[in-house]
């Protein structure tokens, strides 16, 4: 998220305004101090015109799509595949995709 923001010459306060949240909330998401709700991830993917796999760090390939809708089941399936294929623990999976451990755990429970 930080890289996308920098590449678009935006400040945290700019993204916070787009997401209708406080700047310190967004800052905590970038630092992975707090979990980011998936609906906000979807808004970011649409804003930056990238797919969720790229935004979640699952893929390095940017695919520009029409406006995205969150498919929670597919996200969960992809995270589980990544975890199994690479023999990752929950902590290692979280580190690999750059998301908080609580978020990846919540996705796996869906």
Image (cartoon, rainbow, N blue to C red):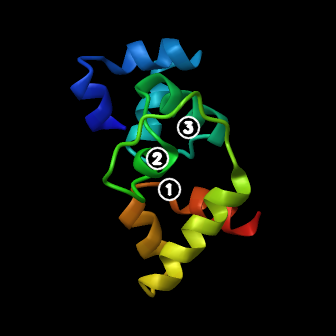
User: Sequence-wise, which precedes: disc 3 or disc 2?
Assistant: 2
Instruction: Say which residue label 2 marks.
Output: 33
Question: If the image is split into quadrants, where does the N terminus sit?
Answer: top left
Residue at image coords 47%, 73%: 91
Within 10 Å of the Cα at label 3, are there few (<14), some (14-19), or many (20+) other Cα atoms?
A: some
Circle 3 or circle 2, nearest the eye: 3
User: Sequence-wise, which precedes: disc 2 or disc 1?
Assistant: 2
* For the residues bearing labels 2 and 1, Cβ distance under 8 angstroms: yes
Within 10 Å of the Cα at label 1, are there few (<14), some (14-19), or many (20+) other Cα atoms?
A: many
Instruction: Report the residue that reaches farthest toward the bottom.
Output: 87
69 or 39, which lies in front? Answer: 69
Q: Quadrant of residue 10?
A: top left
Instruction: Say which residue label 3 marks.
Output: 41
Residue at image coords 32%, 50%: 61
Asked if one can make out residue 21 in the rendered structure from this viewpoint, the answer is no
Instruction: Say which residue label 1 marks.
Output: 100
Circle 1 or circle 3, nearest the eye: 3
Q: Is residue 74 left or right of residue 99?
A: right
* For the residues bearing labels 1 and 3, Cβ distance under 8 angstroms: no
């Amino acid at each position: 998220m930080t890289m996308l923001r920098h590449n678009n010459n935006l400040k945290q306060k700019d993204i916070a305004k787009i997401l209708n949240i406080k700047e310190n909330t967004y800052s905590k998401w970038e630092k992975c101090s707090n979990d980011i709700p998936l609906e906000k991830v979807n808004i970011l993917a649409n804003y930056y015109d990238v797919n969720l796999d790229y935004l979640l760090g699952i893929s390095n390939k940017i695919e520009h799509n029409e406006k995205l809708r969150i498919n929670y089941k597919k996200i969960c399936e992809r995270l589980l595949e990544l975890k199994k294929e690479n023999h990752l623990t929950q902590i290692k999976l979280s580190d690999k995709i750059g998301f908080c451990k609580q978020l990846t755990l919540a996705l796996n429970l869906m």
